[in-house]
Image: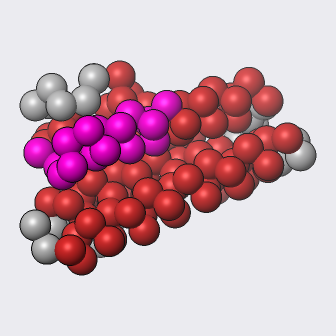
């Protein structure tokens, strides 16, 4: 596997981890919508880290999510619950960012932050233990 794929994968994992830290800080400050946004983007960056190892990327979020679900969830590499994590996070993030009067609370933000942490840890562990994607 070309070294640049591993470098890109690590860059994206580092980016995901930074977004988790930001989500946690925003959560602690009571900025729940922004915390949810960062939690989603942490999961998104972690997915793109895996895609980097496969040498693929997509211009739209839906493409990244669809590929990840098809290649990593449906094949059993990752548990099906992570499909729900990312699909729910995508929808909630869209609502937080674009829907007028969309209300979230502390519990919503905490759930998304916890999901982002778990999602990141599972993907990072997979890469560490396998040394590569699929």
Task: Name the image quarter holding residue 59.
Answer: bottom left
Residue, far right: 29
Structure colour scheme:
secondary structure
Percent x, y for residue 63?
Answer: 25, 58
Q: Give the residue at x 21% y 49%.
A: 131
Quadrant position of the C terminus in the picture: top left
Percent x, y for residue 51?
Answer: 23, 58
Percent x, y for residue 38?
Answer: 62, 53
Residue 91 in view (yes/no): no
Residue, far bottom: 4
Quadrant position of the N terminus in the picture: bottom left
Q: Magenta includes 121?
A: yes
Percent x, y for residue 35?
Answer: 71, 47
Left or right side of 60 for 28: right
Magenta residue span: 118-134
Left or right side of 55 for 24: right
Q: Give the residue at x 51% y 55%.
A: 16
Task: Name the image quarter holding residue 97.
Answer: bottom right
């Amino acid at each position: 596997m070309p070294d640049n794929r591993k470098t890109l994968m690590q860059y994206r994992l580092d980016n995901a981890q930074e977004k988790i830290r930001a989500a946690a800080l925003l959560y602690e400050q009571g900025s729940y919508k922004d915390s949810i946004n960062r939690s989603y983007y942490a999961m998104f960056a972690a997915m793109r880290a895996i895609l980097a190892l496969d040498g693929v990327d997509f211009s739209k979020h839906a493409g990244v999510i669809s590929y990840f679900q098809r290649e990593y969830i449906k094949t059993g590499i990752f548990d099906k619950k992570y499909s729900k994590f990312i699909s729910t996070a995508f929808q909630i993030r869209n609502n937080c960012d674009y829907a007028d009067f969309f209300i979230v609370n502390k519990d919503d933000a905490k759930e998304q932050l916890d999901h982002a942490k778990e999602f990141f840890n599972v993907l990072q562990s997979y890469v560490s233990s396998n040394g590569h994607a699929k």
